[in-house]
Image (cartoon, coloured by chain):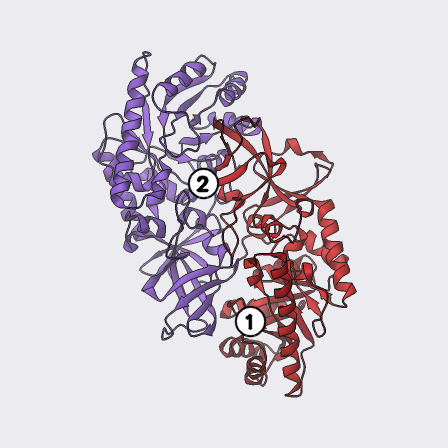
Chain colours: A purple, B red
Amino acid sequence: MTAISLATLDTPALLIDLDIVGRNLERMQKKADKHSATLRPHIKTHKIPELALMQTRLGALGVTVAKISEAEIMAEAGIDDIFIANQVVTEEKINRLAALAKKVQLSVGMDSIAAARRVSDIFAAAGLEIDYLIEIDSGLNRCGVSPGRDAVEFYQAINALPSLRFKGIFTHAGQVYGAGSLSEVKKLSLLESRIMAHTALAFGEVGTSPDVVSVGSTPTMKVWQGHESVNEIRPGNYIFHDAIQISLGVATVEECALSVVATVISRPARERAVIDGGSKAFSSDRGAHRKEMASGFGIVLGNKATLERLSEEHGIMSLDPDEDLDVGDRVRIIPNHACAVVNLFDRAYGIRNDEVVEEFKIAARGKSQ
Amino acid sequence: MTAISLATLDTPALLIDLDIVGRNLERMQKKADKHSATLRPHIKTHKIPELALMQTRLGALGVTVAKISEAEIMAEAGIDDIFIANQVVTEEKINRLAALAKKVQLSVGMDSIAAARRVSDIFAAAGLEIDYLIEIDSGLNRCGVSPGRDAVEFYQAINALPSLRFKGIFTHAGQVYGAGSLSEVKKLSLLESRIMAHTALAFGEVGTSPDVVSVGSTPTMKVWQGHESVNEIRPGNYIFHDAIQISLGVATVEECALSVVATVISRPARERAVIDGGSKAFSSDRGAHRKEMASGFGIVLGNKATLERLSEEHGIMSLDPDEDLDVGDRVRIIPNHACAVVNLFDRAYGIRNDEVVEEFKIAARGKSQ
């Protein structure tokens, strides 16, 4: 498209600074290359096929998704190596998995005998095989089997099932979002890698070894310095960053590519202004697995105000009584949680130097099945 | 459609119990009729044209929306009387307002001279007029002018502008969602009506009177017993109710029409199960204008568990170690905030007696402009 002025976009609108995206992607790819690890970014942050293709063009081997519906969208766009880093258990979804496995290189997480049996049954009946990675709980207490011997025992319990090919082990140390400081992030990152290295070694005792040992979240990967055994990393948020990453010390404002532009619709009092974006534009997310963000629902650029409360269509900002923000003025805000915010919009606008240069359809928005 | 079993829907899926919807709609319509008030329900809760038409068929005069994009969807579906209970200030949106005003009976909120001038300019240039209602801040501290004399002075400041027709005054006492008890809800409901009656009287001193005096939220309307001067009510949530309404004492579980059905994807520990719906299915909403919900992110029907933590695609439930919930089992959950949850889905399924009888497109989902 021809570049147009940002001022011509009606609000609220979702903006992606493509220069910042480029730098964020290159930095993480370099880190992966330096430590001889495969980069397999999680697309849940951007949900946009064009950006996934940008990641694979820069060197990512494939992508990570959370749902079969996301995998279908990415496959349709030409991504040919997809890992569903989640448990797929319903018959309908396993059937879709089988259909997709005919078209692309597909792998899936496992953490229960029940799910393994279902996947095995359906794939065997279709005459297909699928690669699986065992999910390891490295402290998030979400899905996954325990590290070490427990993981090996789980492998032994399911590996004789037909149509399942053991590919490796993976974890997501999402508890890092509860860290209180960057040094705590570093400790958790090291722990994540060590737990996986230890578990990989345990497989040696039964005469096998995982081909892939996969870790990753944006905070733990930001401080990661490589680790023996770990050969795949799966950060997602690093493409955009957000106010939560800033609060962890993982990113600066200048490294945040995603923002929402909104318009002041009311200035009912000197210390209060209301914008036309609320929880439907910023989400109510104040950080999962952690205490609430102290800074409200996003970072108002230029420090003009604090986005203190959200209704669905109203953002209530508190501000200095002398702040010159009038009805019709615009503000740009870095949201708390980029992934949740992208999921609320149908479209995003790519910008460079505050000019709109591209319009993206958020093709994998709302894909929760 | 032919009725199908609920078990055939893949998860997570959004369910609307149409029998409960019918009872909720009839009850509120009867209350409006009894107190000689017009019912103008806010469609932000359901976002579904078919349900808006159900409301008007039962007696609602028209609907309330928050955004011009929502108004366009409702007009297209055949709703011919629409109030945008919000401030519309951008040029693009006012142009859309003018286009829509040619097709349906349209009215809009006002609380600033700046916005009034813009609307007046564009409507006058198009040779059109528009009804406006002055927004009164009855304690929410969001948009709106102060009650009483301030409202009258604002009216005097804008009423000479061409193309604007004064229709009335409106308020939304959303601070009721911070109430600690039903008796506090009752006090706020009475206060809301009294503030509006007092303001309506103040207009008499300058020789005019508002035709419409409009109040409403589901909690304040639940306990409302009519009030002199108040002649329009605008509840929205009452069509579905949700866990927040239950926590306020405003609804019972049996009056909640909206639920999410999800599948257990992992049972990594006796006291923990993980379902395939997270913040993309339940939202991170724990109640606006209030303390956090003590009960987690929704009410798990059958009291099987507590939905304690959400990632985007995972719901982490804590449960009794003896609870018989295995991988593949399903749970139904009443979400905290129905309006926010509906906004996350593209489709909802109408059910009666646990059979799926209708599929709805959530046509006004994501309409935040």
Q: CA distance from mark 1 to mark 2?
A: 36 Å
Residue B322 in sight here:
yes
Residue drawn at the location 76% of the way across and 55% of the way down: B26
Residue B43 in sight here:
no
Indicate which label's residue lies in the foreground, 1 or 2. Answer: 1
- The local crowd at label 2, few if under 14, some if 14 to 19, many if 20 or more residues have their Cα within 10 Å, is some
For the N terminus of chain B, give its image quadrant: top right
Residue occupied by mark 1: B137
Tag 1 subunit: B
Amino acid, disc 1: Asp
Circle 1 SS class: loop
Residue occupied by mark 2: B311
Residue placed furthest toward the bottom: B206
- Residue B233 location (% of width, % of height): 68, 65
Quick check: B334 above or below B189? above
Q: Quadrant of residue B354?
A: top right
Query: Is B321 on the left or on the right of A105, as rendered?
Result: right
Tag 2 subunit: B
Q: Looking at the image, is mark 1 or mark 2 earlier in the sequence?
A: 1
Residue drawn at the location 60% of the way across and 61% of the way down: B184
Circle 2 SS class: loop
Residue closer to the observer: A339 or A194: A194
Residue drawn at the location 24% of the way across and 38% of the way down: A31
Which label was assigned to residue B364?
A: none
Amino acid, disc 2: Ser
Q: Quadrant of residue B101?
A: bottom right
Query: Is A302 on the left or on the right of A67, as rendered?
Result: left
Quick check: B341 above or below B127? above
